Image: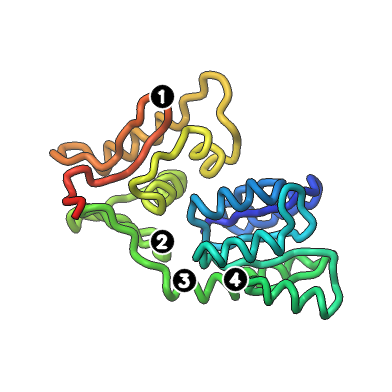
Amino acid sequence: MNILIVEDDDSVARFLKQAVSEAGYAPLVVGNGLLGLQHATNERFDLILLDVMLPGMDGLTLCKSLREKGVDTPILIITARDTIEDKIEGLDSGADDYVVKPFLVGELLARMRAILRRGVQQAPLLQVADLTLDPATRRAARAGKTIHLSATEFTLLNYLMRNKGRVLTRSMILQHVWEYDFEGNDNVLEVYISYLRSKIDKGRTSPLIHTVRGVGYRIEDVDADPG
């Protein structure tokens, strides 16, 4: 499960990232409302943890903007604003739940699980050509043949397939899958792309994983009829 955390307080952001990671989710942390809007609009997440008081764009405006754009990703607001009026305003802005700071980690995770359970029942099977990936069971197959993936390979393939047809930059992929920005000569991304290609595209006349030179990668069936 991919979680977007939009929180500008560094200590809270680190705490949330650690709690979410230890619970087995894949977090991406941004500290600005406008950046949160950009990521939530252009990428696919299973849940958004959203602070209200943010630079660039406040959380309630961000929440309303996403709903107006048709983004239906579940949103859990996390804030120190604790009046009934604040909670009503947050839920009316389009949030699915509302947690007041300070909070217990157990309660936060329980609320996250409750929201995510609703989505898992409706989680679509991801498909590109004859390649399928079930996010709920983590099972991948091409042309009906099972593909065994490591945890990192699954996270990378899941991210590519959720954004099929889109060019994902190296920094976007590294930040989402490995949680850091690319600097220097680190070739971990190329290594794992090579692993995936060997399992998915090797021996195929129609490869699905494509390199966009100087930018990054995309997954797409280039032979598909554009309709």
- Residue on which the image places disc 1: 214
Q: Amino acid at mark 4?
A: Arg
Q: Residue at x 63, y 69 (%)?
A: 112
Q: Is residue 149 left or right of residue 83?
A: left
> Between residues 58 and 148, which one lies in front from this camera angle?
58
Q: Tell me which corner region of the image, top left, top right, bottom left or bottom right, holds residue 122.
A: bottom left
Q: Residue at x 50, y 65 (%)?
A: 70
Residue 120: give its label. Answer: 3
Q: Secondary structure at mark 1?
A: loop
> Between residues 155 and 35, which one lies in front from this camera angle?
35
Q: Tell me which corner region of the image, top left, top right, bottom left or bottom right, holds residue 209.
A: top left
> Where residue 38 sits: x, y (%)?
57, 48
Total tally of numbered discs in the picture: 4
Q: Secondary structure at mark 2?
A: loop
- Residue on which the image places disc 2: 135
Check disc 3: other Cα within 10 Å, few if <14, some if 14-19, many if 20+: some
Q: Amino acid at mark 2?
A: Pro
Do the CB atoms of the residues marked 2 and 1 lie less than 8 Å apart? no
> Where residue 190 sits: x, y (%)?
40, 29
Do the CB atoms of the residues marked 1 and 4 lie less than 8 Å apart? no
> Where residue 211 sits: x, y (%)?
33, 31
